[in-house]
Amino acid sequence: MRRRLGLMTCTVIILAIGILHSDLNIGLGLDLPANFQSKATLDWGYTSNKQIDNGYEVYAEYLHPIIRFTHSALSIGAGAGYLFARQPAYEYQYYNSVNDERYGFIPLYLVGQYSQKIKNITFYVKLKGGYNIFYANEEITNHTNIKNGIYGGLSGGLNLPYNTFLELSYQHFTGGLTYEYHYDYNWVHPADISQSGLSIIIGYQIKIDL
């Protein structure tokens, strides 16, 4: 009993030390126009590329340094984001029709960061990878089944005064759509989707160092 209690105490202390010497990054991003690709998985399928308008996102990341050098550090952690639903910019509109289709992504990922301090300015690069939830409004889900996919990203940025930071991020999302139409005949049309583009992010860094 005492051995088990001692082991639990040591575990709590180690976790507390890790948490109390970490960073929590909270960011707000402007997603630049991106490419949205839908590729049918049937033999007779086609590939459709659509341009996605500007959008916005929010995210939070927890980073813990595992290796520290004099002017650099290697950190690992986890993050989650939310891309607000965006509407594709269709090349053609028929009879002034209005299309209200909107979709977005919720990435959940692991992140690794290398930071380097040069002349009192800290630069960093991040590599992110994980899982994303693909969501859509009723204009899509009324006749389409959607599935989630994988997420990957590469970022670079610098720390600014007052615990703020500026970051440029490239992100890639995947998922799936299955269109179903039931009129005179049943038509099922599965497709793989992907979205990739750049984001400009500004955020605030909370130092957890008590």
Image: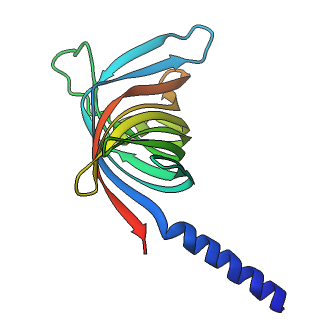
Q: Quadrant of residue 26?
A: bottom left
Q: Quadrant of the N terminus?
A: bottom right
Residue depicted at x 32% and y 36%? 102
Q: Farthest top residue?
A: 44
Residue 200 or residue 90, whichever sits in front: 200
**39, 77: nearer the viewer:** 77
Q: Picture coordinates of residue 110 (x, y %)?
A: 55, 47
Q: Is residue 84 visible?
A: no
Q: Position of residue 177 (x, y in %)?
A: 51, 30
Measuring from the top left, give residue 156's x and y in whole percent: 39, 35
In depth, the one of 168 and 55 nearer the eye is 168
78 left or right of 15 in image? left
Q: Is residue 42 above or below residue 179?
A: above
Is residue 44 shown to the viewer in this render? yes
Q: Residue furthest left?
A: 96
Residue drawn at 24 percent across, 31 percent down: 54
The C terminus, quarter of image: bottom left
Q: Name the quadrant containing residue 149.
A: top right
The total number of labels drawn is 0
Which color scheme is applied? rainbow
Residue beneath the point at 47% across and 26% down: 194
Identified at 51% across, 34% down, the residue is 152
- Is residue 173 rendered to the left or right of residue 12? left
Q: Position of residue 21 (x, y in %)?
A: 49, 66
Is residue 53 shown above or below 30?
above
